[in-house]
Image (spheres, rainbow, N blue to C red):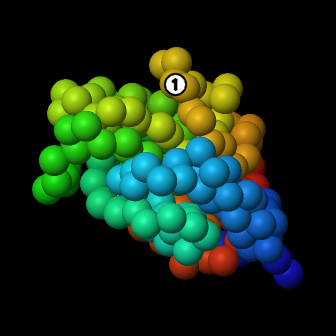
Amino acid sequence: MDTIQIHDKSFGIFLEEEKIISRVKELAQAISIDFAGTQPLFIAVLNGSFIFAADIMKSISFPCEIQFVKVSSYHGAQSSGKVQQVLGLNQNIKGRKVIIIEDIIDSGLTIDFLRTDLLKQEPESISICSLLLKPKALKVKIDVQYIGFEVENHFLVGYGLDYDGLGRNLRHLYRVIE
Ligand code: IMP
Ligand code: MG
């Protein structure tokens, strides 16, 4: 009943919306405490993080700004291993405290590329907040300050994450049925 079909794959419920939202609120509270009074700049990574970023922002209790960048690295259900920034920032981040918002860290190459790129502009600091992290898939060492859930190496869709363009609108997170 809770199985869904996207393209050639079946998916079953992995995390329900209610659980996701309550964890997102915890992350936002932690960020609100850590960055109170500092007016950080959130940088959300499109497309996958658009729902997560929106929900995080709604629970942040201090004045803050958000910008969006686009980094493409993923095709279908397997990471290509190549990262390429498609859409850059139109705001100077020199001297700013930056918080990157990402949907999921898999190999870590996307976030590593983005972080390295942003560091060239000499921000005061860069913190990373990712809804999901696949520790066993990491190919580079990444310090992630805020993690929603650590997950196994299964392909997930929903809550902003897609499988070849589809599934971003699903309210829950779904896991591929192998
Ligand atoms: P990485 O560069 O390998 O860390 O890949 C990060 C990007 O790949 C994320 O921002 C997602 O857009 C995408 N991605 C990684 N794993 C999944 C998944 O399980 N489902 C959907 N997209 C994923
Ligand atoms: Mg993404």
Nearest the camera: 126 or 138? 126
Residue 19 image position (x, y, % from top left):
81, 66
Instruction: Indicate whether 106 appears above or below 178.
Output: above
Q: Quadrant of residue 39?
A: bottom left
- Left of 138 or right of it: where is 40? left
| Residue under label 1 | 142
Query: In the shown orientation, is residue 177 left or right of residue 104?
Result: right
User: Camera-side residue: 94 or 133?
Assistant: 94
Question: Horizontal and vertical percent for residue 83?
Answer: 30, 35
> Which residue is drawn at the image coordinates 65% and 43% (left, top)?
147
Q: Quadrant of the N terminus?
A: bottom right
For the residue pair 37 and 44, the one nearer the viewer reads as 37
Q: Nearer the viewer, residue 55 or 35?
A: 35
Callout 1 environment at 10 Å: few (<14), some (14 to 19), or many (20+)? some
Q: How many marks?
A: 1
What residue type is disc 1 on?
Ile
User: To which quarter of the image does residue 87 belong?
Assistant: bottom left
